[in-house]
Amino acid sequence: MAASALEIVLERIAVVSSSVGRSSDDITLIAISKGRTVSEIMEVYAQGHREFGENRAQELAEKAPLLPDDIRWHFVGPLQRNKVSKVRGTLLHSLDREALARAWGSAPALVQVNTGEEPQKHGVAPAAAIDFIDMCVGLGVEVRGLMAMAPRVSHPEQAAPFFRSLRELRDEAVVQHPAVRELSMGMTEDFETAIAEGATMLRLGRAIFGTADYQ
């Protein structure tokens, strides 16, 4: 029997992790299921996978009740304050402004950093990230780490400096805030580079579900 897309991805994660002296057990693979049907998600779930991510609050609110309760949901897209209630119970990967931090409350979240300082992308500027983390923790948010999306590059290796800068910010933040440990970075096109730079969470859609994903 041919290996499934999920099995191939897990094997690639294991190989890269080993090559850089890491254990793949320290990396969480999040299957980005935006635009996917309940049946498509269940196909991946049936293979033993439990970590799934969505980037639209309404889509998550519609799907989650139709799927098993033991799925661990991640919300990876921009979030409006008036949609917070729709994604309660997820790990928020896109905390990027004070108003959202106040609305999010004490639930777990990752601070999104715009490591490439691209105007079209969400995220806190790298220079402001430490102060922003301090503020969020002061408000009671359970900040568990950082998230970033590298700029589009011609070769995956060119994303390395952006992932490295996120890791360095995490290393600086963890001195004062020991809970800030996660690094959510790496997508279908660059996840192997992200592993080499210390990613603890990968967000993959096309590599698991196929090219129909509109990620």
Image (cartoon, helix red, strand yellow):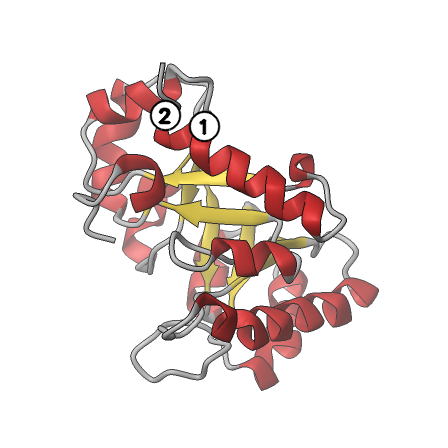
Residue 97 in the image: x percent, y percent?
Answer: 45, 71
Q: Could you tell me if residue 26 is visible in this image?
A: yes
Q: How many marks?
A: 2
SS for callout 1: helix
Residue 3 in the image: x percent, y percent?
Answer: 39, 23
Q: Is residue 89 above or below residue 75?
A: above
User: Quadrant of the rendered structure where residue 89 is?
Assistant: top left
Q: Would you name the residue on which mark 1 appears?
A: 7
> Label 1 near label 2: C-beta < 8 Å?
yes
In the figure, is residue 18 to the left or right of 89?
right
In the figure, is residue 25 to the left or right of 12?
right
Local packing at callout 1 (Cα closer than 10 Å; few below 14, some 14-19, many 20+) is few
Q: Is residue 204 above or below residue 153?
A: above
| Farthest front residue in view | 1
User: Quadrant of the rendered structure where residue 120 is?
Assistant: bottom left
In-front residue for pair 79/28: 28
Q: Is residue 178 above or below residue 171?
A: above
Q: Could you tell me if residue 141 is visible in this image?
A: no
Residue at the image point whose x is 76% and y is 72% from the top: 172
Residue 139 in the image: x percent, y percent?
Answer: 61, 61
**Rendered-image quadrant of the N terminus:** top left
Q: Would you name the residue on which mark 2 appears?
A: 4
